[in-house]
Structure formats: C-alpha cells, structure tokens
C-alpha cells in the first residue's frame, strides 16, 4: 500500500483498521519531503523526532483501542501553515524578525486537527506575514509551482498547496483574507475552501470579531475538505462570533451519496464579476467550458452576477484596518525590516478616519442586501423582480484567479489581460471581491491550459450555507476528477 496515493478519507480508514501503521505513513511522508522539497521549497521547518514519538504513541494506542474509538484523523501526518502558531514548533510568518520564534500557544485550527489525531511534522512556506498571493520571503526563499517550476505557487497558503499537489500529505490547513486558500489551490490543481465567518473561530487573535480573514482547509478533493471541516468547524468559547454551521453538518454531508444531485440547482456564471474585471482569455474559457459540465449534471446555468460595486471599498478598508491592527507595532518597531507592501497596507489602515469607517459600514450594509437578494435569502427575486419566497441562485461560478501561474521571479503581476495593476492585491480581485461579501467560497480544479497550467473554478454560496455549497462543488469534483492529474516532480 502506498499511503501517499490515498485520499485523506481512505488513509484515515487504513490507519484506524491497522492496515498500515502511523509510523509507516510518517516514514513515507518524510521520504516524500526528502524527494521533492529540495525542488519546490514548500516545507520550511520539520520536527522529525517529535513526530516519530507521536507516531509510536499513536500505534501503541491503536493496538489496544477499537477502530471506532480512535479519533477521525488518527495517525495522519501534516505540516502546517507558517503563520499558524504551533506550540513548540517554530513559527516565523515568513519574517526575519520572527525567524526563531517558537510559540507557547497553538491556533485553534491546528488544536482541532491535533485533537482529531493529526501528527504535526513541521511548517509550510508563506509570503512575509501572509501578505500577497505569491509565496516568497527573505527567510526561506520562493516556493515553486510543481506543474511548472518556473512559475509561482500562489499564496499565501502556497507551501500548503504544493505539499498537496506533490503528494507529501493529503490535507493542509490555511487561511484566506484575499484569496490565500483559493488562489494557491487554483495554481496547484487542488481544493481550497474559505468558510463563512464563524465556522472556524479566529482565536486566539487580537480581534476575535474579525471577519475578513478566515482559517480553513485544503485537500486534493472536495470530499477530503469536507472531512477536514468535520474536524475544525464549530464554536469556541473564546470567540464572540456566531457559528452558522456545526461540525456535525459536515459529517452528515460526508455520509450522503453523490449520485446526480444537481437537478434543480440554479448556477449563475460570470467571468468578469459584472465589473469588467480583467481575466485572461484562457482562464475565462475554462470557466465557460466547465459551466457546461454543471449543466450536464442537471444544474440550470445562466449568466448572472450579484452587483459587487461596493465590494472593493469594503475589502480595501477592512483589510487595511485588520493589517494595521495586527502589524503596526511590528512595522514601527523594525524600520526597514518589513517588505514595502506590508508597510503600504499598514499605513493605509492607520490613515483611516471615522468618516472612512462610517462609509464602509454603509457600503457593507448595501453589499449584504445585494447578496441576500442574489441568493434569495431575503425573499426577493434574484433577477430584480418581486418577492420570491426565499428562492434565488444557489451558486455563483467564477474564475478563482484572473490569470494562470505567473513567473516565479515576479513579486506580483503588473498586468492582467492587457490592463495595468496598480497595487499588489489588485490582480487578486476575483478573490477579494468575494471575500468582501462574507460568502463561503471554494476553489476546485477546473482543468488545464494548453501549456499544462492548472485553472481553478470558484464556487460561491450564500453566507451560512457552506454545506449546500460543498454539496454542489463535490458533485462537480467527483464528475471531473481533475486533481488526479499529478505534477511530474
């Protein structure tokens, strides 16, 4: 049995029923890191001695425990995102300032994976302070795309996405403010899911009510993402944010048969988000081609998009505020040691006025109303007509990224589809516009360009309807299985 070829769900079953040991899986995990990591530079910290001790303990526990009494991810090894605190394991955030930091606390998303039986083996590369969607920093260098080693792996969960694509591990944790789960998933032919606010609590953190940045899961299939969500979702007493979807709802979804579930599902499809967002022609072509697959699965697919004219303002101001809250002291205390893009974002946050924040609050209210209209959660006709009794579009289908993976030596794309980009986040609008809505969104492999570069499809659902969104995304994923095409690394 090759454990690296198994899905997370199948690997968990094999471990629970002792068809393979946790030590054997761990050895294969580290052997794969040794084989591919010198080429792609995805894993930046390893704790092999600690992991081997945990694998031995896991096997000893399994020897005296019934399979059904073992935790759901018993013995599965995972490296974690280097911005997620891990007690006793170096967490650098890709910054020279914190190159030797070993936290005493652990982020809740990793706590929950560990409680479910995951063996933590190290950390994955990130951009400095997770700023931007290209994974490079002065501490560890650049992570490369395994489908084309001259290209970007995306970010900020770029290292995580590459560990999945190269079969180092079947699951990964990540986070997403402006696309940091979705963009690298698209660039690496894997799945990245950004849940509704509150589904995975943002604790510990400076602002437990923060809603724009969300922690989440990545995998090589939607089904394995659902498995991960069944472990990491749920409320936390430290978080004041309401959790709209409990872990049990994801467990129930895993038990459903896929079959042909899209009859009656209404899918809206857009390539420019109704705002003339520049998207490369080959990327847009893949989105339109794969929309036909959804129609073949029984969905009703029509061109449509919510009115997102307030989304840019909401995203830009909220991101600036959140980054200033988190990093202003670091920037002030370490002049010349933080990259320019982070300084720019922090300065924008510090410069926000009360009037700015009031205008953004009103804009967010309008955006919330528009999302309710579009998905029918406010009882209005999504086409703009009269009351519809709560019906509307079920899913919005759009590009995850506006372009294919770009050259790894770039800091960020200066141009997309012939249009100049003014900032390091502007080329990510296909993701940031959706972040501003608070909607759950998932990037699913949609196929490849003629040159063999991956393209991701972004499925978006109504806030709080994460399970309904994942049901549709899983049906598409099961029908196409694009992620089974592995890179040649």
Image: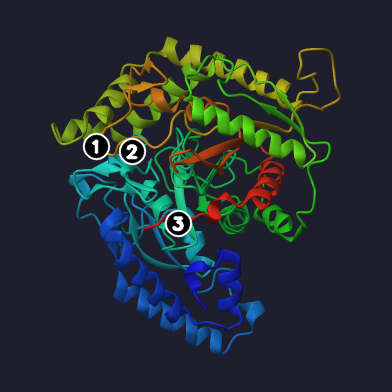
- Identity of the residue drawn at 70% across and 39% down: 293
Q: Earlier in the sequence, mark 3 or mark 2?
A: 2
Q: Earlier in the sequence, mark 1 or mark 3?
A: 3
In the picture, the disc for residue 409 is 1
User: Horizontal placement of 155 versus 11: left or right?
Assistant: left
Residue 16 coordinates in the image, percent (x, y): 59, 78
- Identity of the residue drawn at 55% across and 56% down: 484
Q: Is residue 400 visible?
A: yes
Could you say whether the residue bearing mark 3 is in a helix, strand or loop? helix
User: Horizontal placement of 419 versus 473: left or right?
Assistant: left
According to the image, label 2 marks what residue?
Answer: 134
In the picture, the disc for residue 242 is none
Residue 127 coordinates in the image, percent (x, y): 30, 41
Which of 162/214 is in front? 162
**Looking at the image, residue 365 lies above or below residue 222:** above
Q: Nearer the viewer, mark 1 or mark 3?
A: 1
**Looking at the image, residue 312 lies above or below residue 261:** above
Could you say whether the residue bearing mark 2 is in a helix, strand or loop? loop
| Quadrant of image for the C terminus | bottom left
Q: Earlier in the sequence, mark 1 or mark 2?
A: 2
According to the image, label 3 marks what residue?
Answer: 164
Q: Nearer the viewer, mark 1 or mark 2?
A: 1
Q: Crowdedness of circle 2 by 10 Å Cα count: few (<14), some, many (20+)? A: many
Dividing the picture into quadrants, the one containing residue 287 is top right
Which of 381/486 is in front? 486
């Amino acid at each position: 049995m090759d454990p690296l070829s198994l899905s997370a769900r199948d690997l968990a079953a094999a471990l629970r029923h002792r068809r393979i040991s946790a030590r054997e899986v761990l050895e294969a995990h580290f052997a794969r890191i040794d084989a591919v990591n010198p080429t792609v530079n995805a894993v930046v910290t390893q704790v092999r001695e600690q992991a081997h001790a945990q694998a031995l303990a896991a096997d000893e526990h399994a020897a005296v425990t019934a399979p059904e009494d073992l935790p759901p991810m018993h013995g599965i090894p995972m490296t974690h995102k280097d911005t997620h605190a891990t007690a006793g394991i170096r967490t650098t955030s890709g910054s020279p300032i914190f190159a030797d930091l070993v936290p005493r606390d652990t982020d809740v998303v990793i706590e929950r994976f560990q409680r479910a039986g995951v063996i933590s083996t190290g950390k994955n590369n990130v951009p400095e302070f997770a700023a931007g969607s290209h994974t490079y920093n002065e501490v560890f260098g650049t992570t490369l795309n395994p489908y084309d080693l001259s290209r970007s792996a995306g970010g900020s969960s770029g290292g995580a996405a590459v560990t999945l694509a190269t079969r180092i591990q079947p699951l990964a944790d990540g986070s997403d403010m402006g696309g940091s789960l979705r963009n690298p998933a698209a660039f690496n032919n894997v799945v990245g899911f950004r849940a509704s606010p509150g589904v995975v609590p943002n604790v510990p953190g400076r602002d437990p009510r923060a809603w724009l940045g969300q922690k989440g899961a990545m995998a090589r299939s939607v089904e394995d993402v659902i498995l991960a969500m069944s472990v990491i979702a749920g409320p936390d007493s430290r978080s004041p944010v309401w959790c709209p979807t409990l872990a049990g709802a994801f467990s129930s979804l895993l038990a459903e048969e896929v079959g042909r579930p899209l009859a009656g599902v209404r899918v809206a499809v857009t390539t420019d988000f109704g705002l003339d967002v520049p998207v490369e022609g080959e990327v847009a072509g893949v989105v339109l081609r794969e929309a036909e697959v959804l129609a073949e699965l029984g969905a009703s697919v029509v061109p449509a998009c919510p009115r997102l004219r307030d989304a840019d303002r909401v995203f830009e101001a909220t991101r600036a505020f959140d980054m200033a809250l988190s990093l202003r002291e670091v920037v002030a205390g370490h002049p010349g040691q933080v990259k320019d893009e982070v300084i720019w974002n922090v300065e924008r946050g510090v410069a926000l006025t009360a009037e700015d924040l009031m205008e953004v609050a009103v804009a967010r209210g309008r955006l919330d109303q528009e999302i309710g209209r579009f998905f029918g959660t406010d009882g209005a006709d999504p086409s703009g007509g009269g009351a519809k009794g709560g019906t509307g579009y079920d899913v919005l289908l759009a590009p995850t990224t506006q372009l294919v993976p770009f050259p790894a030596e770039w800091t960020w794309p200066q141009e997309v589809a012939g249009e100049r980009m003014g900032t390091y986040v502007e080329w990510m609008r296909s993701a940031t516009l959706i972040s501003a809505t608070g909607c759950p969104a998932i990037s699913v492999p949609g196929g490849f360009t003629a040159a063999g570069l991956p393209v991701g499809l972004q499925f978006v659902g109504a806030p709080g309807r994460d399970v309904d969104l994942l049901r549709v995304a899983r049906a598409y994923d099961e029908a196409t299985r694009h992620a089974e095409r592995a890179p040649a690394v």
